[in-house]
Image (cartoon, rainbow, N blue to C red):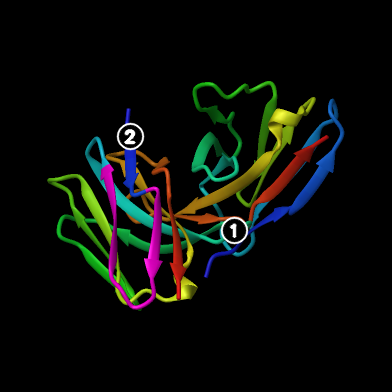
């Protein structure tokens, strides 16, 4: 059974500082996704990572994937208030089509 | 980009009644649709996988007689919560999948908030 763990579960950030969210998964995966969810809303797709060493960046967010370590990171550079949200990673098991979600990381950026 | 709609966005019902939620892919044909539920401050849990014209595949612990899924076409799937109880109150999110086996993408609907009184 595929298990996906995120940490930390909650992250209080100061504006302007850098932070990292970690996503570990337990079995071989075809691809890994990062999503953002604002309160009361559905998911917004941020990144999809397909191969070992993949790195994607959009604005202040950068995601990377290490398939050997079964680890993905979401790095936030110079946090701003607008980044306050819950971030989820989700993994598709090799040869599968179902997403298994991590527990989510609630991010609160304070001035 | 691909758009998935859900209707209704919010529904309040009395205990014992049934509620139907629709999920539509608006500008693409979805090979597969998925239904998730999310309790407050928790993650998304997959309930079932739905393919057009065939029976849905339910995840362990999900009652198929309580959560009826119909996938009538490549653009429409419905989830009916039968004999709803307060513990069924949740945020229900559908997604629609398109693309090839390796490049497929799931597009998420905006969610339906169900409150059972």
User: Marks 2 and 1: same chain?
Assistant: yes
Please say if A69 is above or below A27: below
| Residue linked to disc 2 | A3
Discs 2/1, front:
1
Q: Is residue B52 above or below residue A50?
A: above
Q: Chain of mark 1?
A: A
Q: Name the residue nearer the viewer: B26 or A6.
A: A6
Query: A3 or A13: nearer the eye?
Result: A13
Residue drawn at point x = 59 percent, y = 47 percent = B94
- Give the percent coordinates (x, y) of residue A23: 29, 49
Question: Which residue: 48% across, 66% down?
Answer: A84
Q: Residue A51 versus residue B32: which sits nearer the camera? A: A51
Q: Is residue B97 visible?
A: yes
Q: Which residue is mark 1?
A: A39
Which badge, 2 or 1, is on the more N-terminal residue?
A: 2
Provide residue B102's location: percent of width, then percent of height. 31, 51
Residue B32's spot in the image, x, y percent? 52, 44
Q: Residue furthest left?
A: A68
Q: Quadrant of the C terminus of chain B?
A: top right
Does the magenta stretch mainly form a helix, a strand or a loop? Answer: strand
For the magenta stretch, what is the residue range? A9-24
Chain name for mark 2: A
Q: Quadrant of the rendered structure where residue A77 is?
A: bottom left
Question: Disc 1 on helix, strand or loop?
Answer: loop
Give the x, y percent position of residue B31: 51, 47
């Amino acid at each position: 059974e595929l298990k996906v763990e995120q940490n930390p579960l909650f992250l209080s950030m100061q504006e302007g500082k850098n932070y990292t969210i970690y996503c570990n998964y337990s079995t071989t995966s075809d691809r890994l996704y990062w999503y953002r969810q604002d309160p009361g809303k559905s998911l917004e797709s941020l990144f999809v990572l397909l191969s070992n060493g993949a790195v994607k960046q959009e604005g202040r967010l950068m995601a990377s994937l290490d398939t050997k370590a079964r680890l993905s990171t979401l790095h936030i550079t110079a946090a701003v208030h607008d980044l306050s949200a819950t971030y989820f990673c989700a993994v598709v098991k090799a040869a599968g089509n179902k997403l298994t979600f991590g527990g989510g990381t609630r991010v609160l950026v304070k001035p | 980009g691909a758009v998935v709609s859900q209707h209704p966005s919010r529904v309040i019902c009395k205990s014992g009644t049934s509620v139907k939620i629709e999920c539509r892919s608006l500008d693409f044909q979805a090979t597969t649709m998925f239904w998730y539920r999310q309790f407050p401050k928790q993650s998304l849990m997959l309930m079932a996988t739905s393919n057009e014209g065939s029976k849905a595949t339910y995840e362990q612990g999900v009652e198929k007689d309580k959560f009826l899924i119909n996938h009538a076409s490549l653009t429409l799937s419905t989830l009916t919560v039968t004999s709803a109880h307060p513990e069924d109150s949740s945020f229900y999110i559908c997604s629609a999948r398109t693309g090839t086996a390796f490049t497929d993408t799931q597009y998420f609907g905006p969610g339906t908030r169900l409150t059972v009184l």
